[in-house]
Amino acid sequence: IAAAIAKVRLQEAADRRVGTYSRGMRQRLGIAELLMRDCKVAILDEPTSGLDPQSTQDLLELIQQLSRDGMTILLSSHMLDVVQSICHRVALFNKGRVGFIGTVEELAARIGGGAFIVDVEADGIDLERAAISTDGIKAVRSAKSGRWEVDATSDVRPELARLVVQGGGSLRNLDLRRARLDQAYNRYFREVANAA
């Protein structure tokens, strides 16, 4: 018991009544129970609900440590940024059935996007027309004048920079980011799940 209480950092409150615990402390106490039972799988439903930012961060770090220690964590949450930050794979349910299971990158690829998104700012070029036939580029969307969002299967920044320069354009910015779960989720349900 003492080891489990220490692992979830509740030693100072171990002698207090559970009714006096904050919500975050109760969440950690629940995880201590999992540790005492030597569980191999934990199902956590909205574990950060109602927690303040520091308690949320502490609990997420604890969940990640349990995963590193070999526990399988099934996490149900509507906070997709949190899910993406700590989960290796995601499952999307549609009409009571699993519609997709895999990585965020695999989800992005399934809906026709890329694992990477490159934000481009350039003047004097129609990047949409110039980049669409480039290997690794799935889609090019014009965000507004002189700005584009490029879906790609890999880091295509060198190719995009070359296209801008060769096309006589002036490159102002080139930023790489990973596909976002919230965007892939919304697109999946808008385009794929509802078509089924």
Image (cartoon, rainbow, N blue to C red):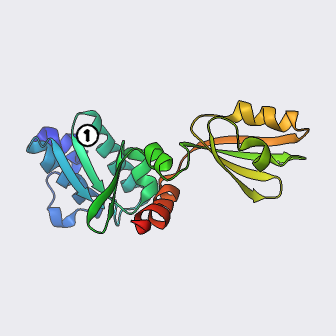
**Measured along the vertical axis of the image, is residue 96 above or below residue 16?**
below
Q: Is residue 93 left or right of residue 15?
A: right
| Quarter of the picture holding the N terminus | top left
| Quarter of the picture holding the C terminus | bottom left
Q: Regarding mark 1 in the picture, which secondary structure is present there?
A: helix
The structure residue drawn at horizontal position 86% and vertical position 46%, both measured from the top left corner, is: 125
Q: Pointer 1: what residue?
A: 66
How many marks on residues?
A: 1
**Measured along the vertical axis of the image, is residue 46 above or below residue 112?**
below
The structure residue drawn at horizontal position 10% and vertical position 40%, both measured from the top left corner, is: 38
Where is residue 158 drawn, in percent x and y?
72, 30
Is residue 22 something that shows in the picture? Answer: no
Where is residue 37 drawn, in percent x and y?
8, 44
Q: Amino acid at mark 1?
A: Leu
Is residue 157 something that shows in the picture? Answer: yes
Where is residue 189 drawn, in percent x and y?
44, 65
Where is residue 187 drawn, in percent x and y?
51, 61
**Quadrant of res 4:** top left
**Quadrant of res 46:** bottom left
Which of 121 and 154 lies nearest the eye of the viewer? 154
Query: Local crowd at mark 1 within 10 Å, few (<14), some, or many (≥20)?
Result: some
The structure residue drawn at horizontal position 76% and vertical position 49%, both measured from the top left corner, is: 128
Which of 195 and 140 lies nearest the eye of the viewer? 195
Q: Is residue 94 left or right of residue 186?
A: left
Which of 33 and 70 lies nearest the eye of the viewer? 70
